[in-house]
Image (cartoon, helix red, strand yellow):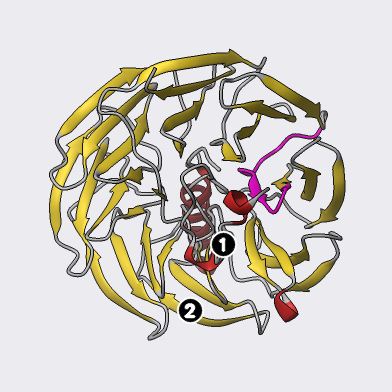
Amino acid sequence: MKMFVAAAFALAVAVLIFVCVSKPRDPGAASPDAKVSGHGTGRPTASGWSTYHGGPSLDGVAATTLPDAPERLWRIKVGNRVEATPVSADGRIYFTSAKGGLFAVDLDGKELWKISIAPDSFTSPPLLTEGVLVVGSGKGVLLAFEAATGKQKWRYDVGGTVQGTPNRVDLAKGKPGVMAISQGDGSIHGVDLESGKGAWKTPSVERCDGSAGVSGDTIAMGSCASALHIFSVEKAEKVADVPLGGDNQVAGGVALSGSIAFAGTRSGKFCSIDLAAKQILWTNADNQGESFMTPALGERVAVFGSDDGKIYGIERTKGTKLWAFDTGNRPTSPVIAGDRVVVASGGSLFMVDLATGRKVWSAAVSDEITSPALVSGRILVGSDDGTVSAYGKN
């Protein structure tokens, strides 16, 4: 009997771990633009998109406007799958391919340089900050490259696969730094941006398949422990866990607006958490599908995606549903520009009205495409057919 109970318990744990980590991740994800002055706000400039979801806070909001009926401006072929959202600054666009390729093109899609790290491959969306591209690899190495030339600056061994985006932090005395999560155990590494030397490492928390948002001194990330974990960059340690309840594993990115965090969960619940008070403000349960996409945070409306094929507009202060839009497939992380929401789903792009969820425009792009980047009036997406496309006004 004891052997049976032990075996049953082991099986239950194995099933939970499999469910938590087996879901495909949301494809993710210089100059004053890339620096995102006051990077803790995470708000990119009109011509900058430093992480797969905008700025360090991962709030998914662009300081640009889009036409109501974008046209395809260009499409370039790069040889193999593009699974992570492009980043951009200074009139340049950067992206990775599945077999270890790293590319730089201009806003017209003209190639500027390319490199390869094969047989290793890039597993995280890139970070673009202060003229440096930082990307995690499948061998557990964080690699930094000069954005202007593609020349490698340094490498740092994280000790495990980096799946979530590296992100920008300020180390001691305001020194520019990067944080990266070791996926397998959820430990966070603080790395000097200039030298690539490790500054600190936090203890393990739990497997983390998503990305952490950064706001000022605070890092917020979710994990398979069904909790939101709050870290202090200054103290280089975890300061609190906020339990989200059973079956509420967080395998997507955590978006921040000041001291308020937003995240979707495996059960489909969408949560708002006060990081200062270390407590849940509200939980929305209108969606029943898994929600491992990174939400976008408008001033009044937060938007998140679900495996049920819909994106939802939620009133930010109360957590009540304002609208739902059915994309007909599994949406990626939505993003916001002005009064418009842009989301990729399957191989199509959709633009909907932020206030009402009414469809404004859609276009078939390819088979499967990344979450979009919004740069200089353009929508940028990569595709599993090995292409990158730009949509905007001709």
- What secondary structure characterizes most of the magenta part? loop
Magenta-span inclusion, residue 125: yes
Q: At which x and y percent is residue 274?
A: 36, 77
Q: Residues within 10 Å of mark 1 (few under 14, many from 20)?
A: some
Q: At which x and y percent is residue 246?
A: 36, 67
The secondary structure type at the circle numbered 1 is loop
Q: Mark 1 = which residue? A: 37
| Numbered circle sitting on residue 241 | 2
Magenta-span inclusion, residue 170: no
Q: At which x and y percent is residue 92?
A: 63, 33
Q: To which quarter of the image does residue 394 belong?
A: top left
**What range is drawn magenta here?**
120-132
Q: Residues within 10 Å of mark 2 (few under 14, many from 20)?
A: many
* Residue 365 seen in the current view: no
Nearest the viewer among 67 and 384 is: 67
Q: Is 222 situated left or right of 261 in this image?
A: right
Q: Earlier in the sequence, mark 1 or mark 2?
A: 1
Q: Nearer the viewer, mark 1 or mark 2?
A: 1
Q: Is 322 situated left or right of 364 in this image?
A: left
**Residue drawn at the location 46% of the way across and 57% of the way down:** 43
Q: Amino acid at mark 2?
A: Asp
Q: Is 30 situated left or right of 219 in this image?
A: right
